[in-house]
Image (cartoon, rainbow, N blue to C red):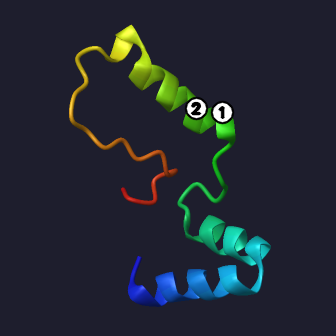
Amino acid sequence: MDMQGKIALVTAAAADPEELIKAAVTRNPMGRAARPEQIGEVAVFLLSDRASFVTGIAMPVDGGTLA
């Protein structure tokens, strides 16, 4: 996201939180916001034995925004 996009998001947030959500969703490749359980599932995985060989990573859970 360029600075114009960031400025637009900050401006929208100051005016109306609902507008901030709409602006973020329109920039997301999946076209929607994450559900809380989707974020939680990643946290549970990282805390589980299944992730015992995972070290030193940043795992974006952003619907493809950083892809």
Q: Which residue is mark 1?
A: 37
Residue 43, compared with residue 58, is above or below; it is above
CA gap, disc 2 and disc 1: 5 Å
Looking at the picture, how far across and down is residue 30, in whole percent? Answer: 58, 54
Q: Residue at x 60, y 35 (%)?
A: 38
Count of marks, rendered view: 2
Mark 2–mark 1 contact, CB under 8 Å? yes
Give SS at disc 1. Answer: helix
Q: Which residue is mark 2?
A: 40
Circle 1: residue type: Glu
Give SS at disc 2. Answer: helix
Looking at the picture, how far across and down is residue 4, in whole percent? Answer: 46, 90
Circle 2: residue type: Gly
| Left or right for 60, reference 63 | left
Image quadrant assignment for residue 11? bottom right
Residue 33, compared with residue 36, is above or below; it is below
Q: Quadrant of the N terminus?
A: bottom left
Residue 47, compared with residue 2, is above or below; it is above
Q: Residue at x 55, y 62 (%)?
A: 28
Q: Residue at x 56, y 70 (%)?
A: 27
Q: Residue at x 36, y 56 (%)?
A: 67
User: Badge 1: how crowded within 10 Å, few (<14), some, or many (20+)?
Assistant: few
| Left or right for 12, reference 29 | right
Image disc number at residue 46: none
| Left or right for 14, reference 59 | right
Q: Which of these two is toward me, 38 or 46?
A: 46
Q: Which of these two is toward me, 17 or 1?
A: 17
Looking at the picture, how far across and down is residue 51, in whole percent? Answer: 33, 18
User: Badge 2: how crowded within 10 Å, few (<14), some, or many (20+)?
Assistant: few
